[in-house]
Image (spheres, rainbow, N blue to C red):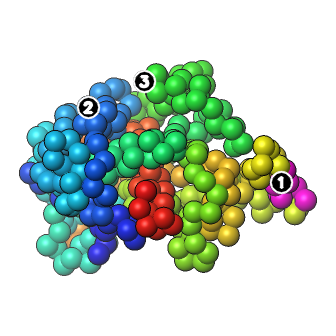
């Protein structure tokens, strides 16, 4: 059950980084929903590797093959199954990792959990390669949400200590959406994007990596979606976002900064606007008591620096029981947060769509 998410829309991810393919099964999609495969392909290209200096040089087309669930380009009620072939793999780079685990990776914990039977090539099923099929599911959910007036938008809020302009938490505009979609580097401020690129390149040249923060906004979600306590909207989003490799933290609205406010500073005053209840500020991030308020859902996910770096690192030989030095091979992103922007959008879209199904029985 570790790779399954959802209450109504069940998303199951399968495959390994260097297996013949990775894929996803979506069970619970309503019948009769058109899926634009060209738009899905364009979304997947935003995550695909090997396209720019700030990503791994591994080249994959990431073209999904739909095996079931569509008839004439429309959902037919059967589980939708899609696979993405792995074509550019170099498994030899990972042979020694069964004995010498990489610091910061799941190599050691996987060895303990699976007793040496785990696939170490490319990180196996712990690899960020598994975010490709996640984006297939999320890309489809994005289309279904868009037909209902709901948009999901993310940007690189920080990388290597360089900060971007934050979203307006009260009103994320269509102009903001259009501006982001038109940029190769996913920041609101072009100047901040250039500074981030320089910081990432400097780390890469030093044989190192940097972490980052992705900020996401979901607009158009009506008030009343979600549940209290364990099935709250924050819970659902957090669960799937933490399924993205390298995520180490998440906050909604003002997040951890709210701990330093007084109640009068943190509370968002309500007011009436053409018969609708709105808030003048949005420190609650669009969710109160686990239930959406009608304001934009705003959250930020923190990504750790890529643990696979070119610098020599200290590790252990599990077979010999001694300390050793390790030089990591393979091809890796100097900042995983850059390509994680569409992945966060995909995760949020899946969580929100599943919650809408939960509220209404169908959408």
Q: Nearer the viewer, residue 39 or 216?
A: 39
**Residue 206's mark?**
none
Of marks 1 and 3, the one in the foreground: 1
Counting from the top left corner in percent of width and height, residue 143 is at 38, 42
What's the residue at 54%, 30% (across, down)?
177
Counting from the top left corner in percent of width and height, residue 105 is at 34, 60
Relative horizontal placement of residue 117, taking residue 312 as reference (left or right): left
Relative horizontal placement of residue 49, taking residue 158 as reference (left or right): left
**C-alpha span from label 1 to label 3:** 38 Å
Q: Nearer the viewer, residue 217 or 86?
A: 217
Mark 2: secondary structure: helix
What's the residue at 26%, 31% (across, down)?
38
Please name the residue that numbered disc 3 is placed on.
184
Height in image: 298 above or below 190?
below
Relative horizontal placement of residue 278, taking residue 103 as reference (left or right): right
What's drawn in magenta, residue-wise? Answer: 264-271
Mark 1: secondary structure: strand
Q: Quadrant of the N terminus?
A: bottom left
**C-alpha span from label 1 to label 2:** 42 Å
Within 10 Å of disc 2 (Cα), the crowding (few <14, some 14-19, many 20+) is few
Question: Picture quarter containing residue 289?
Answer: bottom right
Question: Picture quarter containing residue 233?
Answer: bottom right
Q: How many marks?
A: 3
What's the residue at 59%, 25% (across, down)?
175
Mark 3: secondary structure: loop
Of the residues under marks 3 and 2, which one precedes in the sequence? 2
Q: Is residue 97 visible?
A: no
- Queried whether the magenta region covers residue 287, the answer comes back as no
Please name the residue that numbered disc 2 is placed on.
38
Of the residues under marks 1 and 2, which one precedes in the sequence? 2
Of the residues under marks 1 and 3, which one precedes in the sequence? 3
Please name the residue that numbered disc 1 is placed on.
270
């Amino acid at each position: 059950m570790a790779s399954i998410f959802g209450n109504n829309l069940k998303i199951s991810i399968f495959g390994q980084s260097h297996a013949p393919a990775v894929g996803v099964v979506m069970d619970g999609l309503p019948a009769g929903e058109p899926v634009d495969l060209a738009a899905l392909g364009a979304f997947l290209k935003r995550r695909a590797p090997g396209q720019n200096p700030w990503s791994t040089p591994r080249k994959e087309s990431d073209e999904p093959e739909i095996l079931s669930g569509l008839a004439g380009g429309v959902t037919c009620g059967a589980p939708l199954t899609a696979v993405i072939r792995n074509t550019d793999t170099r498994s030899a780079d990972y042979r020694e990792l069964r004995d010498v685990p990489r610091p910061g990776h799941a190599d050691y914990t996987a060895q303990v959990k699976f007793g040496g039977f785990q696939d170490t090539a490319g990180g196996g099923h712990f690899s960020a390669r598994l975010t490709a099929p996640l984006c297939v599911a999320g890309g489809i959910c994005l289309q279904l949400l868009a037909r209902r007036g709901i948009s999901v938008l993310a940007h690189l809020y920080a990388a290597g200590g360089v900060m971007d302009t934050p979203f307006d938490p009260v009103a994320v505009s269509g102009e903001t959406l259009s501006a982001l979609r038109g940029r190769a580097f996913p920041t609101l401020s072009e100047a901040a994007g250039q500074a981030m690129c320089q910081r990432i390149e400097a780390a890469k040249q030093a044989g190192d990596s940097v972490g980052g923060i992705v900020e996401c906004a979901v607009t158009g979600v009506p008030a009343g979606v979600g549940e209290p306590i364990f099935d709250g909207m924050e819970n659902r989003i957090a669960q799937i976002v933490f399924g993205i490799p390298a995520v180490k933290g998440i906050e909604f609205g003002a997040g951890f900064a709210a701990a330093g406010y007084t109640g009068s500073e943190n509370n968002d005053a309500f007011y009436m606007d053409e018969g609708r209840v709105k808030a003048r500020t949005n420190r609650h991030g669009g969710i109160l008591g686990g239930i959406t308020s009608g304001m934009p859902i705003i959250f930020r996910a923190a990504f750790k620096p890529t643990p696979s770096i070119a610098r020599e690192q200290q590790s252990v030989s599990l077979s010999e029981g001694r300390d050793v030095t390790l030089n990591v091979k393979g091809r890796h992103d100097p900042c995983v947060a850059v390509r994680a922007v569409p992945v966060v959008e995909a995760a949020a879209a899946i969580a929100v769509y599943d919650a809408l199904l939960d509220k209404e029985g169908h959408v």
